[in-house]
Amino acid sequence: MPKPTTAFTCTACGAAHKKWAGRCDACGAWNTIIEEAPLSQGPGRGLGAHKGRAVPLSGLSTSEPPPPRARSGMEELDRVLGGGLVPGSALLVGGDPGIGKSTLLLQAAAALSRRDLNAIYFSGEEASAQVRMRAQRLGLGDAPMRLGAETNLRDILTTLDAERPDVAVIDSIQTLWSDTVEAAPGSVAQVRAAAHELVTFAKRRGVAVILVGHVTKDGQIAGPRVVEHMVDTVLYFEGERGHQFRILRSVKNRFGPSGEIGVFEMTGAGLAEVSNPSALFLSERGQPFAGSAVFAGIEGTRPVLTEVQALVAPSTLASPRRTVVGLDSGRVSTILAVLEARCGIPFAGLDVFLNVAGGMRVAEPAADLAIAGALLSAREDNALPPEAVLFGEISLSGALRPVAQAENRLKEAQKLGFTQVILPEATKLEGVGGMALRRITDLTGFVGEVFGAG
């Protein structure tokens, strides 16, 4: 029988390699390829040598009730989680340093403990006295939660097994170390081992475990991507340091909708919930000016109105600048190309600056029409109607394509006092009245009708 060969696997993406290399060809990560011994296929050791136990099977129909949820009382957090924490679930929360991850989870743990839930907060980056100082500043000194400062994974699991809490917060997973893994804390092997043990404990004991994860320069959670696959929910805490707004975004959720957002405002007393983010993002919008367009977007299941701002100025550089904040720069370049190719409106020799007010990030294609409107308004120095909102996807042919959930977008705009909407011709609307609809077929028609040029 041939001798089994040694396998080499990338801990970041799981790609298999025939030999060791310093860089993974699949994902480009460095120093992530490790040697893994294959399963022995000798006599009596192969998978077909003896039978295993039969796995019980079941159908899709069931009379079991949905899993119970523990509501924290923080409506924005409960919205992102899909209605509250599910017992036995594992959550991973990532975000830039200093964005407020520890503050958010400290407030969440305190809120859960005040609702008669046993909550334990383990900090591997700060001493217990430092956490208590922050809790006093946030007005959480009377919360019945308990603190612990430890990085040894074995000691943390032993404590959790003895205390049997309802919720356990681990801040952060990169600081934990297991004495069974010969690697430094924060390494790929240690992070993967710690995540596996904590997720297994959460499923076995029915404890909701919340893990804090650091992010890399690219904005991804540091460590192997397998950690995101192991947990039930992955949340990203986003925001710009120059803005007081923070966005908690769900990118994976096995118990609720993904893509849902919760909006918070950073104050001196901690994070305050924002129940109406549209009004907050548009609160500083004064008199109408050239280069401003209001976009009616959808984040998860929530309609959110944001302001897209553009500035177009003559450039003295051989290659004009294209600065984009809060939007996909590739999408903006495509819209600029369509404006020049289909509408004959060039932006050569012009610097273009685009920004989403309030530090919001917009990724859906429905923002194409608002981006084009802001760019044309800035270039022609002609303000859009102040009572109008825009949404629609622009194709490469210049046609405007309809987008989903148009009724929810219009209802949110109507609630905030907007009376006019510019949208694609093929958009289907039912049950929305009281707003003037300006239906546009293509980008050329948009330029002619709104800006009076063809």
Image (spheres, helix red, strand yellow):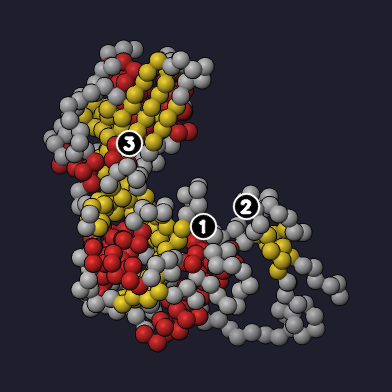
Q: Estimate the x, y position of residue 205 in percent, counting from the top left.
A: 41, 82
Q: Amino acid at mark 2?
A: Ala
Furthest-top residue in this view? 453
For mark 3, does the 10 Å Cα neighbourhood hold few (<14), some (14 to 19), or many (20 or more) residues?
A: many
Q: Nearer the viewer, residue 74 or 401?
A: 74
Type of the residue with mark 1: Ala
Left or right? Give the position of 255 relative to 263: right
Query: Which residue is tagged 1?
Result: 222
Q: Is residue 297 visible?
A: yes
Q: Is residue 87 visible?
A: no
Q: Is residue 451 left or right of residue 178?
A: left
Residue at 29%, 79% in the rendered image: 118
- CB atoms at circles 2 and 1 under 8 Å apart? no
- For marks 2 and 1, the one nearer the N-term is 2
Q: Is residue 184 left or right of residue 268?
A: right
Indicate the secondary structure of the residue bearing disc 2: loop
> Which residue does the numbered mark 2 point to in the structure image?
29
**Residue at image mark 3:** 356
Q: Quadrant of residue 22?
A: bottom right
Q: Measure the alpha-carbon separation of dots 2 and 1.
A: 12 Å
Which residue sits at x=20%, y=25%? Answer: 288
Where does the image place residue 421, in percent across and percent down from the top left?
23, 31
* Residue 441 place in picture, x, y as percent: 33, 24
Q: Secondary structure at mark 3?
A: strand
Q: Quadrant of the N terminus?
A: bottom right
Looking at this view, is 130 or 324 the one in front? 130
Of 72 and 336, nearer the camera is 72
